[in-house]
Image (spheres, rainbow, N blue to C red):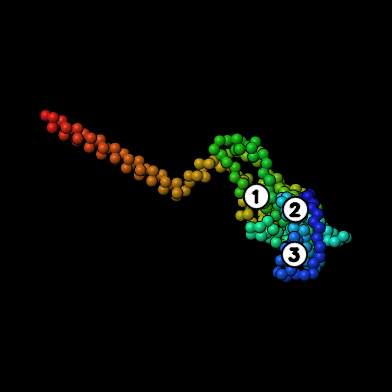
Amino acid sequence: MSEQHTIAAELREDVGKGASRRLRHAGRVPAILYGGHLDPVALTLDQHEMRHATEQESFYSSIIEIKIGDDATQQAVVRDLQRHPFKPVIMHVDFMRITAGEKLTIAVPIHFVGEGQSPAGKTSGVVIQHQVTEVDIEAVPAALPEFLSVDLSKMEPGDTVLLSQIELPDGVSIPALAVSDDNDVAIAIATHIRETQGTGAAAEEAAEAEADIETAADAGEDVDESDGSAEESDDKGEGD
């Protein structure tokens, strides 16, 4: 079960770009709450409270209690969050209501554990690369996990961990795996550093260039030696 957050909200009737701009200047965040077989509702949120909440990874994959006014409370998940390009300001938030018993699809982070204790992690010249850091899952709200944990403690050099090898909690599935086997991608790879730095056509070209340089260097040494011998022979002739 994922962590639950509570956010205070107020209803708003003034909508549009101008209204949203005024709200942001007043330290508020325009938002919308939709879904759950109910009409959409326009809300405003506190900018400071939202910035603090969004600093927590679990906020994006957890059930959120939205307290509207003094009485009404609705459960939702974050569907979209827009930030200012360079200012620490949240521009807009979309929340989707959830309904108990109805499955929802949401992206959750992947936490890799045991990497330092693995044979691959202890082998010099081997690096474990995390290819995927989050995945879309499907679950009812009550079974929604905050994150998925992947144990790498037994990973050997050259091993690959696939998406299908994630141990899922009860009631949780990965929809992409039901669509096609092609979606069973690598999420972690233990590879040798040399393999990542010296493969392909670029490596072959570099090797050929190095060979040409060595050949030229050898030829230069031969010329120098012959020139030296000729000069030495001339000197002897002049002496005679």
Cα–Cα gap, marks 3 and 2: 19 Å
Query: Which of pointers 3 and 2 lies earlier in the amino acid sequence?
Result: 3
| Residue at (78% x, 66% y) in the render | 42
Q: Is residue 187 left or right of residue 50?
A: left
Residue 133 numbered mark, or none? 1
Disc 2 residue crowd, few under 14, some 14–19, many 20+, Cα 10 Å = some
Vertical arrangement, residue 48 with respect to residue 215, above or below: below
Label 1: which secondary element: loop
- Determine the residue located farthest toward the top in the rendered image: 240
Residue at the (65%, 50%) spot, across then down: 133
Residue 41, picture quadrant: bottom right
Q: At which x and y percent is residue 235?
A: 16, 32
Taking depth in this image into account, of 18 and 173 the one nearest to the observer is: 18
User: Dot 2 corresponds to which residue?
Assistant: 53
The answer, for residue 28, to whether it is visible in the render is yes
Pointer 3 residue: 23
Q: Amino acid at mark 1?
A: Thr
User: Which amino acid lies under the numbered mark 3 shown in the image of this protein?
Assistant: Leu
Task: Calculate the distance from the C-alpha at mark 2 to the C-alpha at mark 1.
Answer: 21 Å
User: Closer to the camera, 47 or 229?
Assistant: 47
Q: Residue 78 location, x and y as percent?
A: 74, 58
Around disc 3, counting alpha carbons within 10 Å, would you say few (fewer than 14), some (14 to 19), or many (20 or more)?
Answer: many
Q: CA distance from mark 1 to mark 3?
A: 34 Å
Residue at 73 percent of width and 66 percent of height: 22
Q: Mark 3 or mark 1, which is nearer the start of the sequence?
A: 3
User: What is the secondary structure assignment of the residue under circle 3?
Assistant: helix
In the picture, the quarter occupied by the C terminus is: top left
Report the amino acid beneath label 2: Ala
Q: How many marks?
A: 3
Image marks 2 and 1: residues in contact by CB distance under 8 Å: no
Tell me which numbered mark, 2 or 1, is placed earlier along the sequence. 2
